[in-house]
Amino acid sequence: MRSFLSGWLLIWSSGLWAQRASFLYALWDLDFEAAEREITFEWNGSYITWDQHRLAFFRAVFPLGPAERKAFWEATQLYERQFERQIAPALPELVADMYAQRAIVHALESEWALAGYAAWQSWRYLQRGLANDPLTAQWQGLWQVIFATLPPPYSRWLPGKPSLRWEAAQTAFQKATAPQSYTAWESSLVYFFVLRNFDTLAGAWIDTCRVRLFQGAPPPYLWRFALGLYAFEEGQLSQAESLFQELTCKPQIARFPYPYYWLGKLYLYRGERQKARQMWQAFVQRQTQPFGLAAQYGWRGYLAWMEGDTAEAQRYWQTAVSYSGLLWEEDLLAQALARQWLHQPPDSVEKRLWAARWLLHQGAYPEAQDTLEPLRVAALRLSGDQRTALYYTYGRLYHRWGKDDLARFAYYQATRQVAQANRWMQAYAALYLAQLYERARDWHPARLYYTEAQKIGAAVGRTGVVQKAKAGYERLKNKRYPVPGEVSR
């Protein structure tokens, strides 16, 4: 009888966890109608409240419009007392998740003090979270990553031991991403973005997810977008185009129009200018948030200038630099270029550099090298900013080409030029140089260049570079070279 009851309870609890997994899958697929149906199958009142709050959060973020934002704040105020008084004693990890959602929306609204308070509340409740709940593990891992990548002075007042944060994050994500956990789809995608932004193992993690998850069901919408973005960044443009085009045919594109932006940039790389404009126009028509708008206006200005329409180019560049607040790294890059081009439009050197970049993004590495050759010959006659851009472009070329020794030399040269406008390139060059040394397991120069990337990134306001470099340094700061006597043992 006892074994029968134990088996029945196991089957019953597995079914409940499967329902929660289906709910989270629907959220990340941006299928909110399916998510609402999943809520009706939930029997636990605490999880019903959590589901409803989660759904309100996803509706607010995809997209973050005034109506959805108002509905989210009405929902969170309605449920706040229930979370704290009824749910917190038994399931504090759900309350931690609720406060984390509030922190994210506050941050998107640039309400930093309120975001910080909500984040602190999330961390406070998480300390009491159920150890065997994968949601607890997911947030523990994510908070450890946040702590490991926060720049000073914020990093001085954080809880825990700094030397253990990255290891603690990896351990927590291993638990949260277990295939049998109800957070598997969500945690695996969160972990992918952690690895893509702060580590060098994103490709290996995608291979793991293909075996663990993708064979049982197609990835949800946002997972497929992540796969397309990774293919784009790795130079697999045909695969990226196929994935992004597929997403534009889904009804979810109205909530998440970013595939249009990346298709526009993909066609820009290929020289298909009219297609690029069409994709960016479709993006502007659907985008309700500032992210990506400055970037596409910057690139559209570049296209107009290439076609001889100087007035149109300047209009686009002026629009690009008018955006402020919380922006993408893509936006910051385009704004830096737009400011530079408003002061001095691209000259023959810069046109040749961009021509080489389009070729290397297409995988035409020998052609890109040939395009750069006249600039290499005339390097001594170039300005410090031009030499920085030249060596940085060589570094990206050889990095993509798999010629790591040449890439390291080029990145090093980029960091040693006297630059002003292109100082941000030196931050990225130091970051990529550190990653190459890390891949070669040469810890000392990797630590040196991660430190240099942090300093330059902070000086030029590239927070993304600072966070990535800080995460890299945290991973490596205790690494040491093998001692011959230890190897034999």
Image: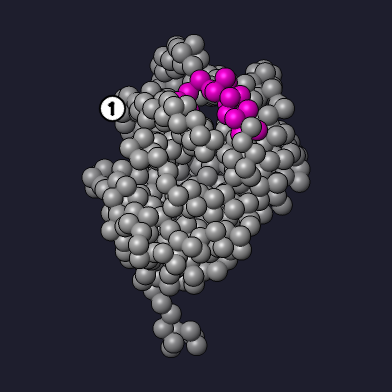
**Residue 16 visible in this rendered orientation of the protein:** no
Along the viewing direction, whichever of 415 and 193 lies nearer the viewer: 415
Which residue is rendered at x = 61% and y = 24% of the image? 282
Task: Identify whether 39 is placed above or below 483.
Answer: above
On the question of residue 32 being in view, the answer is yes
Measured from the top left, where is residue 360 in percent x and y? 58, 55
Tell me: 244 left or right of 394. Answer: right
Residue 63 position (above or below residue 146): above
Residue at (68%, 32%) from the top-left corner?
247
Residue 99's spot in the image, x, y percent?
Answer: 41, 27
Within the image, what quadrant is residue 479 found in? bottom left
Q: Which residue is located at x 32 percent, y 51 percent?
A: 423
As for residue 440 lying within the magenta part, the answer is no
- The residue drawn where x is 31% and y is 61% is 417
Q: Is residue 311 above or below residue 195?
A: above
Give the total of numbered labels: 1
Predominant SS along the magenta part: helix
- Across and down, in percent, residue 9 comes to 69, 36
In this orientation, which residue lies closer to the viewer: 107 or 25? 107
Neighbours of disc 1 within 10 Å: few (<14), some (14-19), many (20+) = few
| Quarter of the figure that contains the N terminus | top right
Magenta span contains residue 279? yes
Residue stretch in magenta: 275-295
Outermost residue on the front side: it is 308
| Residue position for label 1 | 113
Q: Secondary structure at mark 1?
A: helix
Residue 459 screen position, x and y as percent: 26, 48
Q: Amino acid at mark 1?
A: Ala
